[in-house]
Image (cartoon, rainbow, N blue to C red):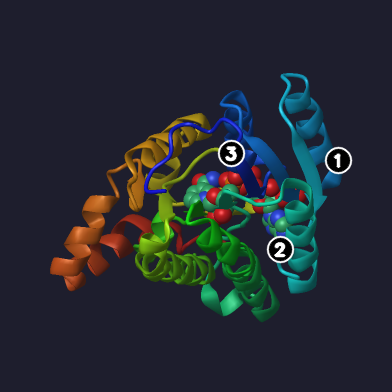
Amino acid sequence: MDRISDFKGVRTLVTGASSGIGLLLCRKLAEKGARLVLVARREAELEALRAEVAAIGVEAIVLPCDVRELAQVQQCVSRALAHYGNIDMLINNAGYGGHRPFIDWPLEDMENMIRVNYLGSLYFTKLLLPQMVAMKNGCIVFIGSVAGKLSTPDESAYCASKHALAGLADALGIEVEDDGVYVTIIHPGAFDTPFFQERDRARMPPVAKAGMGEPQALVEHIFKTLARGRHDTTYPAGPASGYVVRALAPEFMRRQVKKVTFDKIKHLAR
Ligand SMILES: NC(=O)c1ccc[n+]([C@@H]2O[C@H](COP(=O)([O-])OP(=O)(O)OC[C@H]3O[C@@H](n4cnc5c(N)ncnc54)[C@H](OP(=O)(O)O)[C@@H]3O)[C@@H](O)[C@H]2O)c1
């Protein structure tokens, strides 16, 4: 496929379906008649979502899985394929963030962030891609971040994890296009979900707080991206102008980023 707007019967596996953007995406997919595989660690939340979509006649299976663990991902994919035969669409959405200086960021958490935000998506993609290529049909969606295009201080480990994801999505998308697999990455700005814990909200620079959007609008944007067959979008679009400025005038952009982000929060207690 090279775009998708009809989700009726589309067998879709969504990681991070228990909360925030993933939960809203699943609700919208259910409204549109997709068949779902709900993946995250918190089973009770996934079961509640399964019951909710079942009430409107939509089939969903719950597969609790820690995306950091390859063995769990392998088992999850096997069970999803055993149930549905094939998976048509994969939405790599599970992830978490953080706001802290690199020097204070525990190494274990930096490793953990790469495992959840990057390796989790890599595992699901690696395991589900072959059957999409065999069908000559499939769609893989990555939920990236503006932080995966434009690095910001106080988010170093998160930026690194999302840059890795963007690199994977870009290269893979070109490789598998002629095999009928459509790959896209969406880079959200800041949206009000449980993603931002109290500690992170306290260290967010005013420019990021002021731009915080409602996640429902992002979900609408994701469906428009899929309908148009776009491969790389940023929502809201504003920050994308920063990508251009950075490419053309990196020293200027660096000074601007420091001024509107780090200079505003560096006095805060660490
Ligand atoms: N909100 C924003 O402003 C924003 C901006 C840019 C990008 N994003 C990206 O959007 C995605 C979703 O974030 P969100 O805002 O919806 O945050 P959220 O409400 O905190 O949801 C995160 C989801 O990821 C799942 N998850 C985390 N660790 C996991 C693990 N080890 N194994 C399996 N699932 C795991 C969580 O499920 P369990 O805890 O149940 O496992 C939860 O369902 C993330 O990739 C995030 O980086 C968000």
Is residue 110 positioned above or below 54 on the image?
below
Residue 261 has which mark? none
Residue furthest to the top in view is 56
In the picture, the disc for residue 44 is: 1
- The kind of residue tagged 3 is Val
Mark 3 surroundings within 10 Å by alpha-carbon count, few (fewer than 14), some (14 through 19), many (20 or more): some
Number of the label disc, if any, that sits on residue 67:
2
Dot 1 or dot 2, earlier in sequence: 1
Q: In this view, does 106 lie to the left or right of 137?
A: right
Q: Which residue is drawn at 72% across and 46% down?
A: 84
* The C terminus: image quadrant: bottom right
Estimate the x, y position of residue 257 in percent, counting from the top left.
30, 61
- Disc 2 residue type? Val
Q: Nearer the viewer, residue 233 or 91?
A: 91
Relative placement, left or right, of 34 versus 133 is right
Q: Distance between the residues labelled 1 and 3?
A: 24 Å
Is there any visible trace of residue 14 in the rendered image?
yes
Residue at 17 percent of width and 61 percent of height: 245
Dot in front, 1 or 3: 3
Position of residue 133 in the picture relative to residue 69 (left or right): left
* Residues under numbered marks 1 and 2 in contact, where contact means CB atoms less than 8 Å apart: no
Q: What element carries label 3?
A: loop
The answer to whether the residue bearing label 1 lies less than 8 angstroms from the nearest atom of ligand 1 is: no
Specify the amino acid type for callout 1: Ala
Which residue does the image show at 80% across and 39% down from the upper left? 45
Q: What element carries label 1?
A: helix
> Residue 225 at what x, y percent from top left?
37, 41
Callout 2: CB less than 8 Å from ligand 1: yes
Q: Distance between the residues labelled 2 and 3?
A: 22 Å
Q: Is residue 99 visible?
A: no
Comparing 28 with 172, the one in front is 172
| Residue identified by numbered label 3 | 10
